Amino acid sequence: MKEKLKVGLFIPCYINQLYPQIGIATLELLEKLELDVYYPQNQTCCGQPLGNSGYEEDSKGICNLFVENFKEYDYIVGPSGSCIYHVKHHFDILEQTPEVQRVRNNAYELCEFIVKVLGKTDFGASFPYKVGLHKSCHGLRGLKLGSCSEVQGEHFSTEEDLLKKVKGLELMSLNRKDECCGFGGTFAVFEEAISAKMGKDRVQDHLDSDVEVLTGADHSCLMHLEGIINRNKKPIKVMHIAEILNSSL
């Protein structure tokens, strides 16, 4: 019998605190794929907020703790492109021990892991709604989860590959397919007005495209957009892509 892959489930701190349903959906998806999934109880933040704010040196303790928690797994999988990007590309501030390199090399965003590592696209999900896909900057341009609209070449998207297999789902075409939502972590705090305007523009694009449910693979971006939607009482629901892929409506 082939030995199952041992996967360490990384749930970002804001999902753990505010959107536990996304963590549950991610776990259930991975279990459907018959993986051995473990949740290290001592995991905390990946260190991204400190790093984004210029305090990389102060974040080393958090980053080292992340390595300690996840070094034993074949893969580290999380439902957040920005957090996984931070692990893969900004843990260069640490001494590059074999454990650090192993964690950096084996960390994957959920959609990328499912499509590129496991070669799966269909979970038998059903979701009869018009869906708009927000492609986050870290996922698209950092992790290369898809092709960018400003670059010539063949179009591809791991998120689209998964959504197109969902029964009843209609993936709507946006006018500006991969524009930034304006969140940018602490950018939303220090440049509030610019961030809010960029977010409103993204929401309006989805409204203009008759979107009923806005989704994406980075819930930090979705959290920003959902706040704008709720404050302005716009008729769009926000769901992480893991929730849609795990649905059976």
Image: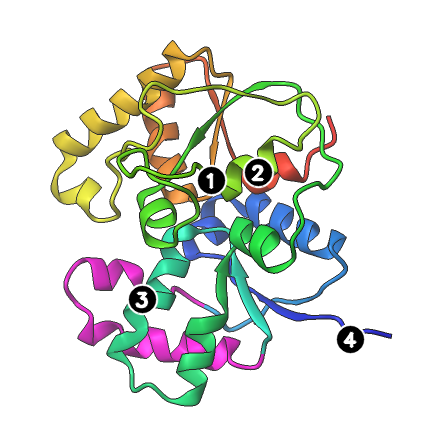
In the rendered picture of this protein, how many numbered marks are placed on residues?
4
Residue 231 to residue 58: above or below: above
First in sequence, mark 3 or 4: give its number.
Answer: 4
Q: Is residue 117 above or below residue 193?
A: below
Dominant secondary structure of the residues highlighted in magenta in the image: helix
Distance from Cα at disc 3 to Cα at disc 4: 30 Å
- Give the residue at mark 1: 156
Do the CB atoms of the residues marked 3 and 4 lie less than 8 Å apart?
no
In magenta segment, residue 58 = yes
Q: Is residue 22 above or below residue 202?
A: below
Residue under label 2: 161
Is 101 magenta? The answer is no
**Which quadrant holds residue 194?**
top left
Give the SS element for disc 4.
loop
> Which disc is residue 89 wearing?
3
Tell me if residue 120 comes above or below residue 66 in the rendering.
above
Magenta region, residue range: 44-72
Q: Tag 2's secondary structure?
A: helix
Name the residue located 66 percent from the left edge and 19 percent from the top edge. Answer: 128
Query: What kind of residue is marked 4?
Result: Glu
Q: How is the image coloured?
A: rainbow
Residue at 17%, 67% (x, y): give it.
Answer: 55
N-terminal label among 2 and 1: 1
Query: Of label 2 and label 3, which has the lower sequence position?
Result: 3
- CB atoms of marks 2 and 1 within 8 Å: yes
Of marks 4 and 1, which one's residue comes earlier in the chain? 4
